[in-house]
Image: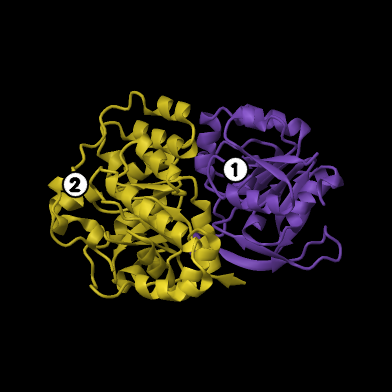
Chain colours: A purple, B yellow
Amino acid sequence: MPKKIGVLALQGDFAKHQAMLRLLKIETVLVKKPGDLHGCEGLIIPGGESTTLTKLIQKCNLYEPIREFTEKHPIMGTCAGAIMVASTVDDQRIEPLQLIDISVARNAYGRQIDSFITHVDVPFLKGSARFKTVFIRAPKIRNVGSQVEVLMELHGNPIMVQESNVLALTFHPELTSDPRIHKYFLEHFLSTQALL
Amino acid sequence: MEKGTFEIKLGLSEMLKGGVIMDVVNAEHAKIAEEAGAVAVMALERIPADIREAGGVSRMSDPALIKEIQKTVSIPVMAKCRIGHFVEAQILEALGVDFIDESEVLTPADEVNHINKHQFKIPFVCGCRDLAEALRRIGEGAALIRTKGEAGSGNIVEAVRHMRKVVGEIQRLTALRDDELMAVSKKMGAPYELVKKTAELGKLSVPNFAAGGVATPADAALMMQLGAESVFVGSGIFKSNDPQGRARAIVQAVTHYNDPHVLLEVSAGLGEAMKGIEMKDLPEEERLQHRGW
């Protein structure tokens, strides 16, 4: 049985995550309503605007269903998705899902003119080449709880962290053609048989 | 570390997908837009319907106004410059706006050339009426394409025409043999490499949004079903009698564009939409969509 992964599709670059998962032969479901989570074995919250995601998660009655889903299943948030899974955010406009013990600052590198691409070591994938990290009006992870493992860092700042079955990334692996991080998410949290 | 490259520009266009970009004329409007769930705001002195009414030369907004809006909201702030007016664009870049709209809504500054958008570090969006126009703008460096529609008309008919045209022309391209693409490119007046790439992809190489005449949640969902990946709403929100409610409803309509039950729910009880203009009452020479080449 192929694994089915949900991609929260309220707003943002969900189609890019979907394309990456398809490349890995994973079935995807675009999640817009609580019922769409049914049968999913994991969930990805994509990049987009976190104020918009806050509104739509509430409007679509997805706040509690996503929290409940996470009790049993893994979840990965990229950029705005990382803001949404955080425990605290430096902005009252955001109501994060509080799934991982990190505090996040929005747009912490500045405006679009400060968006950047760089290459970063991936120590958690032993012997693997550096990853092309795309930061678009990206947040910063300011503090991590004692149970949170830092998987990637840029200039001493955590940019990819994990606690239990929750992964948060401040950059966009879905905007590259490199599937290693998506593969890690699937292999690490689901059975490795999920992949080819 | 790279900054300001085309890939980074395209990254922001991707983040705006599935969303609504709203025209705002002051900080208060901007706040309403953000609270309603807009993915970005377009800061301008007058919304298109009022520009149309005021007449005269319409220019880039006062940077002080844009700055105030930047201070008020956390979402991306876009601003318009005149077609071909690369100095207005330089000023907007210096101001740090997140996106520049080289827009037919303002009075063109150059009747031959558009801006060379590759020279800028921030992304540009441009309007189009057909595929050739879209590809010329992408060739100049636009990281996002939108339909022109007819701004400030409150009438969706032109945006529908433009979206159907672009999507239909792409479909026809995909049916052609490789050796026919050069002749097509010549006939279209569009760069060959982009014609070829579009034929291969079966879609534009940058995101494709809708704009110009969206007044209701149903208009927004119609554009999404026709192939738009996000929707700009100009006059439609703040020319209606319940901007908050309408803005929220349009945001939901874009997310659930394929779900008539949600569209029904969000369309009910919104009060009056903007009045709008019948196209036959709008002489050709007053149509903004004819600006740009």
Give the left or right position of residue A89, taking residue A75 as reference: left
Give the left or right position of residue B267, taking residue A137 as reference: left
Could you tell me the amino acid type at mark 1? Answer: Val
Mark 1, secondary structure of its residue:
strand
**Whole-number angstrom distance, CA of label 1 to CA of label 2:** 48 Å
Q: Residue at label 2?
A: B279
Q: Residue at x 30, y 64 (%)?
A: B81
Residue B43 locus on image (x, y percent): 33, 53
Q: Residue at x 54, y 47 (%)?
A: A12
Q: Residue at label 1?
A: A89
Neighbor class of circle 1 (other Cα within 10 Å; few <14, some 14-19, many 20+) is many
The one of B222 and A50 positioned closer to us in this rendering:
B222
The one of A11 and B121 positioned closer to us in this rendering:
A11
Q: Is residue B17 above or below residue B276?
A: below
Question: Looking at the image, can residue B35 be seen?
Answer: yes
Disc 1 to disc 2: CB gap under 8 Å? no
Question: Looking at the image, can residue A86 be seen?
Answer: no
Give the left or right position of residue B109, taking residue A113 as reference: left
Q: Is residue B49 above or below residue B114?
A: above
The one of B54 and A110 positioned closer to us in this rendering:
B54
Residue B232 locus on image (x, y percent): 37, 48
Badge nearest the viewer, 1 or 2: 2
Q: Residue at x 45, y 29 (%)?
A: B260
Which chain does tag 2 point to?
B
Could you tell me the amino acid type at mark 2? Answer: Met
Give the left or right position of residue A64, taking residue B173 as reference: right
Dots 1 and 2 on the same chain: no
Mark 2, secondary structure of its residue:
helix
Which chain does tag 1 point to?
A
Q: Residue at x 79, y 68 (%)?
A: A129
